[in-house]
Image (tube, helix red, strand yellow):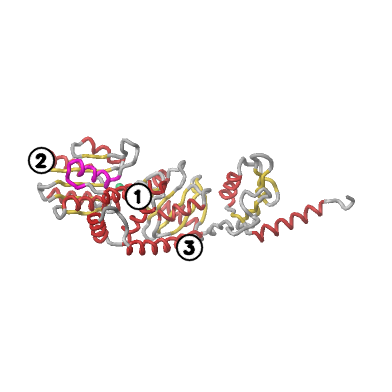
Amino acid sequence: MHYLYSHNDLDGVGCGIVAKLAFGDKVEIRYNSVSGLNFQVARFLERGKADGTLFITDLSVNGEIEKRLNEYFQDGGKVELIDHHKTALHFNEYEWGMVKVEYEDGRLACATSLFYEYLLERKLIEPSSALGEFVELVRQYDIWEWEKNENIQAKRLNDLFFMVSIDEFEERMIQRIKNNGHFFFDDFEEKILDMEDDKIERYIRRKRREMVQTFIEGRCAGIVHAESYHSELGNELGKDNPHLDYIAILNVGGKRISFRTIHDDIDVSEIASHFGGGGHAKAAGCSLTEPAYQWYVAEPFRMEPMGFDAFRNVYNVKQAKHGCLYGNREEETFFIYPSGENNWVIERNGSVIEPSFSSFAEAERYIKRNHSAWLLRDDAFIAFLMENVMRTKEQIPDSI
Ligand SMILES: [Mn+2]
């Protein structure tokens, strides 16, 4: 009997599916949270030496368990720790450690792809196109490559993973891979995935109206409360509002904050680390500590949600040569217009803001960050123009 202790996310369960395809019922699988693994491995070690191999995938153990695992190995026990996280690279010092973050060709690895290749090399698993395709979807999802490649199938695989139980997911994927030349979703899965997409879209639309904007420690943050769909929210709200440095998603009940950014020059794991958390540059999280609560919950509670740009305008459109009009909750107006080559001017309540901007995007970013302004609707724009024409006329002396 082999043993596989793996992470309880898509990549971790992907390892379980690969293991079942390789070993059938000769493998005992347990999925763990990051914190649950040490306990699980300690229990395994207490049971004495196993015949088969203990595989640990997509997770790593703490220093104490690391030492005990090495003793187990020295004693003739079979262990393999297969992971792709940078933080686990030191396990490569052991014969039983196999940690690889990146392939020779620059692609990022995931635990499922590493484990599949490990078994292939040792001829412990039959290669198949369907399995290869499945593994690649898991990889693209796990390391965020699907976004760049717009590989919606990879995202849908993860959605499906969360919509059914782990047991059902395993069973469906194993049958699909065993019985077909290529990987695909069946009609039932396509249907529930479409329903899920609609649901997420409605959810994001609602959350868009609840987001507040503020500066926290010099960074411009969008703050929204949400229990689910953090990746989708972070991505959509981030793309809608490129003037925001990052999106903070609050789950007060779970006492957690997620941080997401779409910008390459912002590292949200750094922001999370201020509050004892961590993660990746574009996605990170921390516990909702007292100071974090003050910054992200208590202060923003008094703020009005952000307004959003009018989207059905015909006249008041962004970057128009005749100018375009923004407004905010303080009822200030911001008129952005070009003045010569690569020069954009902002008039705030009729007075020019100095200095001017070299692009429309920069001017817009300035008023969105500093004045929480949004593109006003056509009717407001027309009223503004009429008022200004009147004012100009009043200034013309009668004698002309
Ligand atoms: Mn992973």
User: Marks 2 and 1, Cα distance to the nearest angstrom?
Assistant: 37 Å
Q: What amino acid is labelled 2 in the image?
A: Gly
Depicted 283 relative to depicted 86: above or below: below
Label 1, on which residue?
141
Q: Residue at x 40, y 58 (%)?
A: 229
Q: Secondary structure at mark 3?
A: helix
Q: Is residue 115 left or right of residue 47?
A: right
Q: Position of residue 156 (x, y in %)?
A: 36, 56
Q: Residue at x 35, y 37 (%)?
A: 106
Label 2, on which residue?
76
What is the magenta range? 110-126
The residue sitting at the front extreme is: 181
Q: How dense is the environment of label 3, judged by Cα within 10 Å: few (below 14), some, or many (20 and up)?
A: few
Label 3, on which residue?
206
Towards the viewer: 13 or 303: 13
Depicted 318 relative to depicted 88: above or below: below
Q: Main secondary structure of the magenta part?
A: helix
Towards the viewer: 166 or 155: 155
Whether residue 56 is in magenta: the answer is no
Q: Position of residue 94 (x, y in %)?
A: 20, 36
